[in-house]
Every structure is written in structure tokens, then in C-alpha cells.
Amino acid sequence: MSAAKVITAATRQRLQQLFEHGKKSLEKGDHEYAHTLFAQCVAEDPTNLVYLQHLRSNLAKKHGEAKKSSLFGGLNRKLSSSRSALVKAKTKGEWEAAFTAGCEALDHGPNDPATLIELADAVHTLGSSECQLFYLKWALDANPKHEQANRDAADALAAVGQFEQAIVCLKRVLELKPNDKDLERKISRMSVEQTIQKGGYNEELLRPGVSQSATLDENATAAIKASPAGPHHDEPQTPAEPEETPESREQDLLDRIRLYPAELSHYKDLADLYNSVDRLKDAERVLTKALTVSPGDLDTRERLEDTRLRRMRQQVDVANRRATDEPSPESKALAKKMLAQANQVELEVYAARAERNPANLNYQFELAMRLKRAGKFREAIKSFQVAREDTRRLSDTQLHLGECFQKIEQFRLAMSSYEAAVQAAGDANPEQLKLARYRAGVLAMGMGELEKAEKHLTEIAAADFSYRDVADRLDKLSQMRNT
């Protein structure tokens, strides 16, 4: 299937204008026109959660005010026709057409689980786990016991590390399929994943073949907890102040925010608390709220960015672990997709930081690395060229710069960068030096500059004859000279 089309800055600006008009129409009660505008926004930018949230909110008001009879009869045929168009377009990878048909179907049946499940699958293919979960929650709000919606939601929640909610969904399915042993095993495995994610337990418990004897005996654990802390346990103790729990601390901070909504420190303290117990989405939500209180507070913005980065990396770790423990084309594809999604978030964060701090060479380098990973080599080159001013990592920067030039077939510039990397590496960084010489030698062979290729590859062979395929390349060079 084809990927979603790239949204240009001009398109994003146009969609934002449509979105603002849609919000005004919603406020005026013109739900028909608001749906048309929100549907266009969703169709052209289907991974935008804000557009999707407003689409649902408007549909709820539109159909909540409609007569009950209007939701039946002929509309069922229209719903079925639009849903069929959605499935057909989705199969072809025609995403704008698919989401246009999906929004039309929702207008005819705003709580139709089958439509919502199809849309969730489509947006998952485009890499948005947040929008996927939004569609699935929408379906479950309409029908909490819908089997396929619960199964899909469980998989989606597990993919982003939300095992507790995933287990709830699977238990609903188990009520419908009480003898499903595979489902029971899946719930058991997710319970272990949930325990590991909370910390302090051995990941080997997830490996196939590990028995329950790998865990501590419950009686022994109870005995350890009951054992006295020291030799004076019979002496009367002064009653201690009750310890503050995360729950009581959370409630205290929520109360403070309610009483003093303009005080940023309470939002930050609450976000720190959520971060400390891995409630990263809650931390994001609180920091986002804090930014509405003080949009210009740079510390809050960077805390939000750091939390987003941490959450995305955690999701990548979960997906990679699943791909390792349960290897399948689907789990490997998911791990790859989560990695790309995390890179995109990192790219956006470092782009914003580089824009705010143009003199910060570390931000320029990190941005360039994410652009390179995303295949945006021309943009990466610009940031790497700025980052060259940092002489502490000059060899590394020149090496990456050369690889980007080579990707866009600017071979002379690539060679110049590789040779600059060789010079900057020197003897202080032998591995970096070997890699820079290898890149230069291989490129020189491709360019027909045999003398230069031989020079670089021979230098590597003199230091490490087993390095990559240097020995074979030197043999090939000898053959090329003799022909």
C-alpha cells in the first residue's frame, strides 16, 4: 500500500483555515457545514487527532439533535454504500478517498463500529497510533462488547505499552468466548508485560519456556515482608507521620491547580509525579494544559518535548521486545513503524529546538541525524553543514555529511566530506578513521579513481585486514588494474 501523501506547509495552512471555519460553524450550530469542513480536514490530514476530535464532537451534536427516525431506513443503505467505498479505497491505498468515504459513512451512522474499525485500521497503516485508538474507543463507546473492536483495541493498546487497558479489552472478549485458551494465554502474557513495565522484575519471565518457578514463592515473599526490621522490634514505637503516597500527592497537586490555575509550578510538579510512575500520557496532558496558561514558558515547552520523546522511545522498546519475543511479519512491521514514528517526533522536537536556539550546534546535529534517518538528505545536509562548527564531533559530522551527499549522487562533494572525516578523525579515533577511509575507498572505486581507492583501502588493511570486505576489494582493485 502507498503511504499518505506529504502535507506541504501551504496545504497545512489551508486546512487550518478550513478547521477554524468549521469551529465557527460548530459554535453557530451549523452542524451540516461544520461536518463538511471537518471531514475535508480529516480526509486530507487523517493523522491529525485534533481534526478527528472535532469531527466526532460535531457529529454527536448533529445527530443528537436529529430525530431518531432519521437514523434509520434509507440511511442504512447510504451507510453501507459509503462503508464499501471506504474498504475499496483503503485496499488500493487511496487514503484521501478512503477517509472521505469514511467521514460520509459516519455522517450516516456516527456510531457504526464496522466503519470505525475500518478507519482505525486505515490510520494505523499510516502510522498514527493515537488516531487509531481514538477510532477504536469511539467504537467501544458505541458498543462496549463488540468483539472485533475489543480485540483490535487490545492489540493497539499493547503496542504502545498500555497493557492494563489492553487486558480490560481482552477480558471483555473472554466473556464472549469463555473457552478461548489462546485468549487466556494472551491475557496472561500481557499481565507479565505490565508487571515488567512497572519496573523491578526480570524480563526473562517473558521468554518462552520459563516456568512459574522462576518467580519467588508467595509464602517466602510474605515471610520476608513480615520479618522484623531490627533487634528492637518489640520496643514501643512513636507513631510516625503517615507517608505521602503518589495518590495523595496527585490529589494535592490537582487541588492546588484547581485553586491556583495560573501557578505553573503546580503543573510541573504534577507532570514530574506522572513521569516518575511512567504515566507519560498524563504528564503530556498536564504540560499541554500548562502551555495554555503560559504559552511562552520555554521550560514547560521543553518538559513537554522531553516527555513526548520518552513516551515514543518507550513505545519503540515495547514494539521491539514483541518483535523479538513473538517474531512475525506483523510484529516486525509494527516495530519498524514505531521506530519511524518516533524518529518523526524527534525530528519535530529538534527542529523546534534548533529554530529556538540557532547557535546550539548539538541541536543542529541531532536534527540532521533525524532528517537523514527520514530520508530527507538535502535538508539534513544543511543542518550537518551548520553542525560542522562543533570541532569535537567534526569527523562524525563529515562522515554523515558525505553519506548524505552520496545519497543525492553528489559524489565529488561526498568524497570531499569523507576525506575531511579522515583528516578530522586522526589516530585518536581508530574506528571512525577506518569507517571514513572505507567510505572513501568504496566511493573512489565506483568513480574509477583506482589509485585513491587503493590508498584508502590499503591503509585500512594495514591496521585491520579483517575489516569488512577490504581484502576482497583490494583483490578486485588488482583485477581492475590488470584489465
Image (cartoon, rainbow, N blue to C red):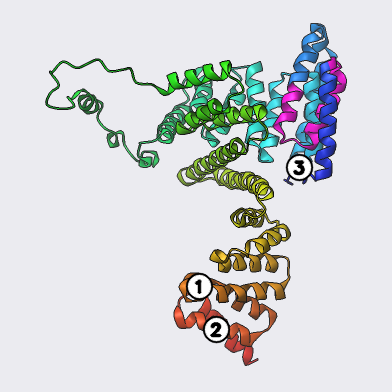
Image: 147 above or below 438: above
The image quadrant that residue 51 belongs to is top right
- Label number found at residue 445: none
Other-residue count near label 3 (Cα within 10 Å), few / some / many at <14 / 14–19 / ≥20: some
Asked whether, in this view, residue 393 is left or right of residue 232, the answer is right
> Which amino acid, by three-letter code, is at mark 3?
Gly
Nearer-the-camera pick, 223 or 98: 223
The secondary structure making up most of the magenta span is: helix
Please tell me whether mark 2 or mark 3 is closer to you in this view.
2
Label 1's element?
loop
Does residue 224 show up magenta in the picture? no
Q: Position of residue 284 (x, y in %)?
A: 58, 32
Task: Measure the alpha-carbon separation of dots 1 and 3.
Answer: 40 Å
Nearer-the-camera pick, 67 or 384: 384
Mark 1 or mark 3: whose residue is earlier in sequence: 3
- Label number found at residue 468: 1
Q: Position of residue 249 (x, y in %)?
A: 44, 21
The magenta span reads: 28-56
Nearer-the-camera pick, 82 or 205: 205
Mark 2 or mark 3: whose residue is earlier in sequence: 3
Q: Residue at x 77, y 14 (%)?
A: 61
Residue where numbered disc 3 is placed? 93
> Which amino acid, by three-letter code, is at mark 1?
Arg
Q: Is residue 85 visible?
A: no
Q: Position of residue 83 (x, y in %)?
A: 77, 27
Label 2's element?
helix
Does residue 39 show up magenta in the picture? yes
Residue where numbered disc 2 is placed? 474
> Which amino acid, by three-letter code, is at mark 2?
Leu
Please tell me whether mark 1 or mark 3 is closer to you in this view.
1
Mark 2 or mark 1: whose residue is earlier in sequence: 1
